[in-house]
Amino acid sequence: MTSDNFDIAWNLLIKRYDDKWVITANHINAPLQAPVATTVSAQSLRGLLSAIIENVATLKALNLPVDQRDMLLLHLLEKHIART
């Protein structure tokens, strides 16, 4: 290993992991694939809400327009809470 290889390795990492399209798709899909809260409890709702907030925060960090998507997020939450 030499410092000459650092630039090559760094560029390979950037090429592989700095794909905004893939990152965006993963964070849009994550709430859609969240497990359904089988019990209506504070713990299960908190877990689901945390997962959605985390992914929305990442999308905001990528400068994507997520502030006008409240109805969509509410619909996602509703679909992931089991009806009793």
Image: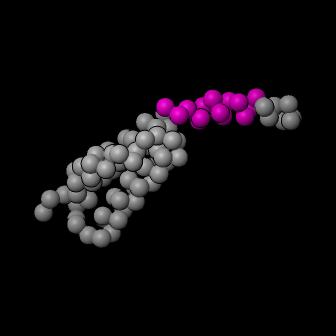
Residues drawn in magenta: 8-21
Residue 13 part of the magenta segment? yes
Q: Position of residue 17 (x, y in %)?
A: 59, 35
The residue under the point 53% across, 34% down is 20
Q: Nearer the viewer, residue 18 or 3?
A: 18
Q: Position of residue 19 (x, y in %)?
A: 55, 32
Whether residue 28 can be seen here: yes
Position of 42 relative to 19 (above/below): below
Quarter of the image with the N terminus in it = top right
Residue 9 part of the magenta segment? yes
Left or right position of 46 against 4: left
The residue under the point 39% across, 48% down is 67
The residue most toward the bottom is 42
Q: Position of residue 54 (x, y in %)?
A: 45, 54
Position of 4 relative to 45 (above/below): above
Task: Place residue 69 in its image quadrant.
Answer: top left
